[in-house]
Image: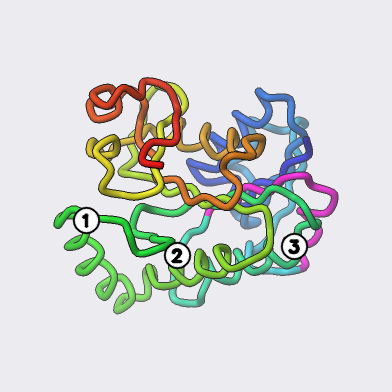
């Protein structure tokens, strides 16, 4: 499979590159020109298209001929970066391509997610402060995902819990809704978030889903009998 990774130079992106290469995929990575050196370990193994991920010329070149596109939706700044990136991928990826996007738990598809007070407070406080200092705009990520949800593409939006570094624990478990007891531990290894993103490319059961994930070895996953990935809460 030929796979484009949009946001390849970030921590999550580099993990996705490794997983994709391990699976034998041909990889095209998109990142800012000043971040190309972060991909030096993959020299000669991937194709790099430098440029802004909101640049439609850059995205068009990168996704050409790709069977799947993995996109990190980053709400940095206040210039609708996530929305512009998502729209470019939706418009320019080939018809029928698998499109997998990353987001946080705060994204909801149907309004049936039940959030803990800590997460609600964090979003309520961080959102306005981040916008005030022009650092990030959580509403931009919300709008980006809304456009994905209403598209007629073969999409998946992977919603990550709190992330931590560490050795892989295996493929995370998932549920359709935050608030499911299996997700209570609210912790996923970043390397495993990336693993789930790459896995989703070939899992047709995830088409049209917005899985909220948690580490498969966390207490909540183990307590609810899901030591391996499964569609909990369906």
Q: Which residue is mark 3?
A: 58
Q: Nearer the viewer, mark 2 or mark 1?
A: 1
Contact between labelled residues 1 and 3, with CB atoms less than 8 Å apart: no
Q: Position of residue 103 (x, y in %)?
A: 45, 54
Could you say whether the residue bearing mark 1 is in a helix, strand or loop?
A: helix
Name the quadrant containing residue 186. top left
Of the two numbered discs 2 and 3 on the same chain, state the one appearing first in sequence: 3
Quarter of the figure with residue 68: top right
Look at mark 1 in the image and give the residue it sits on. 119
Q: Nearer the viewer, residue 72 or 213?
A: 213
Extent of the magenta region: 57-72
Q: Which residue is rendered at x = 63% and y = 66% of the image?
A: 151
Q: Residue at position x 36%, y 26% from top?
A: 216
Residue at 39% x, 53% y is 104
Which residue is the site of mark 2?
A: 75
Few, some or many C-alpha atoms within 10 Å of disc 1 (few <14, some 14-19, many ≥20)? few
Which image quadrant: the N terminus? Answer: top right
């Amino acid at each position: 499979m030929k796979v484009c990774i949009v946001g390849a130079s970030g921590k999550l992106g580099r993990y996705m590159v490794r997983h994709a290469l391990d699976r034998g995929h041909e990889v095209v990575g998109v990142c800012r020109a000043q971040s190309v050196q972060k991909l030096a370990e993959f020299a000669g193994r991937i194709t790099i298209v430098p440029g802004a991920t909101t640049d439609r010329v850059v995205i068009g070149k990168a996704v050409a001929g790709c069977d799947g596109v993995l996109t990190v939706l980053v709400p940095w700044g206040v210039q609708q970066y996530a929305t512009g990136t998502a729209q470019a991928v939706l418009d320019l990826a080939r018809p029928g391509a698998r499109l997998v996007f990353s987001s946080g738990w705060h994204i909801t598809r149907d309004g049936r997610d039940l959030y803990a007070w800590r997460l609600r407070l964090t979003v309520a406080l961080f959102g306005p402060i981040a916008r005030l200092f022009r650092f990030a705009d959580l509403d931009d990520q919300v709008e980006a995902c809304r456009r994905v949800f209403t598209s007629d593409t073969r999409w998946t939006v992977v919603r990550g819990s709190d992330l931590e570094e560490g050795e892989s624990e295996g493929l995370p478990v998932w549920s359709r809704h935050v608030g499911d007891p299996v997700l209570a531990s609210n912790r996923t290894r970043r390397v495993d978030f990336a693993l789930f993103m790459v896995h989703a490319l070939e899992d047709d059961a995830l088409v049209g889903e917005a899985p909220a994930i948690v580490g498969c070895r966390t207490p909540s996953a183990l307590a609810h009998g899901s030591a391996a990935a499964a569609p909990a809460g369906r």
